[in-house]
Amino acid sequence: MSALTLVEAVRTALARAMDEDPTVLVLGEDVGKDGGVFRATEGLFERFGPERVLDTPLSEALFTGLAVGLGAQGFRPVVEFQFDGFMYPALDQLVNHAGRLRSRTRGRLSCPIVLRAPYGGGIRAPEHHSESPEAFFAHVPGVRTVIPSSPARAYGLLLAAIRDPDPVVFLEPKRIYRAFREEVVDDGKALPLDRAFVLRQGRDLTLLAWGAMIPLCLEAAGRLAEEGVSAEVVDVATLKPLDTATILDSVGKTGRCVIVHEAPPSYGPGAEIAALLAVAGLFSLLAPVVRVTAFDVPTPLPRLEDLFLPAVADILEACRTVLAHR
Amino acid sequence: MASTARATKEARKVAVEVVEPTPAIPSAEELLKLYREMLLIRRFEEKAGQLYGMGLIGGFCHLYIGQEAVAVGIQHALTEKDSVITGYRDHGHMLACGMDPRRVMAELTGRVTGYSKGKGGSMHMFAKEVRFYGGHGIVGAQVPLGTGIAFAHKYKKDGGICATYFGDGAANQGQVYEAFNMAALWKLPVLYVIENNRYAMGTAAERHASTTSLFQRGLAFAIPGTQVDGMDVLAVREKALEAVRYVREGNGPFVLEALTYRYRGHSMSDPGKYRTKEEVQEMRERHDPIDRLKNLMLERGVADEERFKQIDKEIRDICNEAARFAQDSPEPDPSELWTDVLVES
């Protein structure tokens, strides 16, 4: 057991998966010789060789399609995109091919691929390098979308994603790649891909979030506790399929819900969860659901990023809004 | 079938049978201009690197140091009617286009006086008045855009061409070839300039490209191409003059590959593990485009050391003034976050 950062946990899970299954391949921009822009694949090239750790050209549509072909042939390619914004050129292969192979072949072929990317803002990077595109992926039938929020969950969820028989988009919050360490047991145990994690129990309201918003929500919950408010914090983690039971249970208990995400609000994941609550949890709500999100504008330069991204103060304000309803 | 084969053969002829003549030496006045423009890019980028180190430039910053001869040499073959578009290593092209160093630096530092009001940053600046159409962060995405700009030049019959720059990394993006196809079919006035600096971010060209003679990449579309020493501004200028003439005469696109080298990392946050220090050192010491031109000018008596010192001082003053202007300019008002997204209806 050792205390790892999130990026180290990703690397540990990749090595574990490659070690236990020879069909697992790693490919992407600079992942081999260079070890990846965030060092997530450092050492894999040396350990597993150039046949299994492949540097690709800067051709996102190509290497995503390549992964679909490999997947159809029983390989388990794990593709790294250098940054979130570079995933858009690959959307065609994901939507039209990866997500539909199982359905098109009526289950005769599957596409056990993982598309990994550093994701989200908070590292003072401009657009293309600070995007939160999870809604694009979660909208696609036949594709799972998973976002870890801690080293241990990154390890367990990435192993699960690699072992899963279907395509998984695995978004790694780069802002917390090295923000804190957590004990991670490299025992090969995967976490479920359809379960939200209740990180803090509470009675008065539910904070729903994922990725780098989780530490902010935990901080907000701590502050609220000082004021005598008991906030539950749920890490949604698997955006698609969504663990509706855990969400409904939590909001059923607290009656108040604040959803926090980095992506813009319109047609975003928060809207989906709010719809779930309206459809299946309406009578347990004591207050309208509040979303804390970025805005419907392109990711700005660093100087406006603080304004763009949700902060603890925004979360607290939203909590006070839902608490005001008695 | 026969005509296609002939066209390909013609293109191959142009592409392969290029001999490397010693470039013609332009006038003393033009030599001085070329020198100043390259030096301006070099010093400007050094200053940008400093400001980045001081935390004044946020986000990513891709410096053009080492590649100066390409943008400057090409620009000397273009006219005021022509347009320019490039990728994310774009500061050099902007300065070569005649954009104001003060406003470029202001944009790098995210100030309202910048070309994108401090909202675009290093990779996303535009200047319609000099027909510079960006600065684009997605690798290779500017190639279809440049082809579209060329289409407009042709449609409007304004006599202009579009210089569309991309790198060896972008040369493996599929949309580059989708653009080549239509540019050739429609005989669009577009000059594709491939700046081959040998590394696609951290991966060497030999490891990401099946063929590294990128000037031949247009052959399948019967687009002629040629290669030039991108560390020699006179050679770039001369080849660019020929290529621009070919494109402007209505023959369709042309591919000009400049073999160049970036001294700094892919971006400011590049650990540079993929190449040796010796390799970088060798390029800096033996192939530097600015030293090369300076030596030639000294040999020919175009300018003496005293004159070069004076030029260096003038250029340094311009860059210091750009940095001062940038730092003295205000940051965008928070309300700017919501502007220029859609026109209010």
Image (tube, coloured by chain):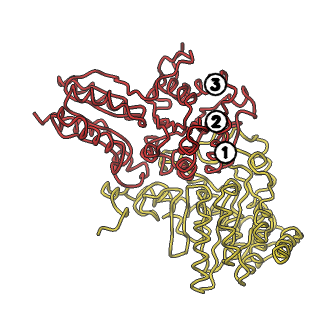
Chain colours: A red, B yellow
Gap in Å between the C-alphas at discs 1 and 2?
9 Å
- Check the image and report above or below for A66 versus A206: below
- Check the image and report above or below for B206 versus A195: below
The subunit letter for the residue under badge 1 reads A
The subunit letter for the residue under badge 2 reads A
- Report whether residue A50 is seen: yes
Furthest-top residue in this view:
A1
Q: Residue at x 54, y 48 (%)?
A: A87
Dot 2: few (<14), some (14–19), or many (≥20) neighbours within 10 Å? many
Residue A152 or A144: which is nearer the viewer? A144
Kindly identify which numbered label has been placed on residue A15. Answer: 3
Query: Is disc 2 placed on a helix, strand or loop?
Result: strand
State left or right for residue B207 relative to residue A209. right
Gap in Å between the C-alphas at discs 3 and 1?
21 Å
Kindly identify which numbered label has been placed on residue A77. Answer: 2
Mark 1 lies on residue = A66
Question: Which residue type carries mark 2?
Answer: Pro
Q: Earlier in the sequence, mark 2 or mark 3?
A: 3
